[in-house]
Amino acid sequence: MVWLALPALLFDTMARATWQQLYQPAFVATFSIACVAVFLLILALRLMNGRHLADASVDAIAASYPNTGYIGFPLALIAFGPASLTPTTIATILVASVLFAFAIVLIEIGLQTERAPHKLGLKVLRALARNPLIVSPIAGMLLASFHVAMPASAETFLKLLSGAASPCALVSLGLFLAEKRPSEPGARGVALLLTGVKLVVQPALTWWLAARVFGLPPTLVEMAVVLAALPTGTGPFMLAEFYEREAHITSRTILLSTAGSVITLSVLLLLMGHRA
């Protein structure tokens, strides 16, 4: 899943993007700052509680990783129409590539035992160069930059492979939740905290940035807020599994935020005058 399906999804997303399509600096800044701010907030809180950097990074991305790919596109299309495709594409790239890469860098740093700065940097770079979740979006971005057209057979193969990423992750997540295993003390409370931050704090911060700081048009403000209010995607769980970190908090956050978003997103869309 992490070695094939998710890299294929990241590659395909970046390969299809165009610079003209993605050049919306105010929207990019709004969504990026909101995601990174929430990530850093949870990271700092978990580190202060004695959490290992690698585990704290997984917790942080669980609180800041909206499911823009598999919930964002259909929901935004229903609520806002075709005009939502570009903002949702931008949000998906920022979340699945940039935020993901940021978390991976911190996890790699946390897992290295080398403390000499130059040696630590080289070890992290070597680890990142072998990581399919880092290499695949970079390769896709290079393909898009040089305007290289993929053969139809390769494109079909990528679509089939990338389409398996979310279903496989959901099955893996379900099996993980169904399996009885001891969890760390306070895991439920932390998962509730991360869920609250994901469903309330992140969209509120996004609204403030979009409306008050960058002055985006009202429709774009609404799109940004809805995308930020989406539940946690399966990406953080796949990341935890890939690095063999404790995934109880992450899996519970995905479950709780997905269930809770049925209410929060419904209320949010009603307040905006949409029905989805």
Image: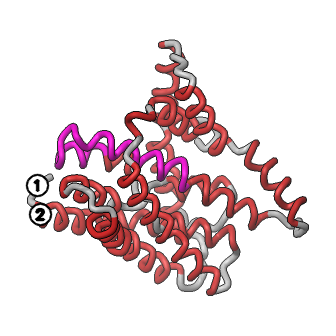
Horizontal arrangement in the rendering, residue 23 relative to residue 203 (left or right): right
Q: Which mark is residue 270?
A: 2
Q: Is residue 76 left or right of residue 185?
A: left
Residue at (70, 45) in percent of width and height:
131
Residue at position x 56%, y 34% in the image:
141
Q: Is residue 117 above or below residue 45?
A: above
How many tags in the picture? 2
- Closer to the camera, 218 or 94? 218
Residue 234 lies, in percent from the top left, at 47, 54
Quarter occupied by residue 229: bottom left
User: Taken as a whole, is the magenta stretch helix, strand or loop?
Assistant: helix
Q: Is residue 250 magenta?
A: no
- Locate residue 271: give its quadrant: bottom left
From this view, report whether residue 18 is shown above or below residue 64: above
Residue drawn at x 78%, y 50% is 125
63 lies above or below 244: below
| Depth order, front residue of 108/121 | 121
Q: Residue at x 88, y 69 (%)?
A: 115
As helix, strand or loop, the secondary structure at mark 1 comes to loop
Magenta residues span 73-99
Does 89 appear in magenta?
yes
Residue 88 is left or right of residue 184, and the answer is left
Compared to residue 63, the image places residue 151 above or below, namely above
Residue 60 in the image: state x and y as whole percent. Answer: 54, 69
Which residue is tagged 1?
275
Taking the image as shown, residue 90 lies to the left or right of residue 131, namely: left
Q: CA distance from mark 2 to mark 1?
A: 6 Å
The answer to whether mark 2 and mark 1 are in CB contact below 8 A is yes
Residue 67 rendering spot, x and y as whole percentages: 39, 53
What x and y, as percent, mark residue 8? 55, 34
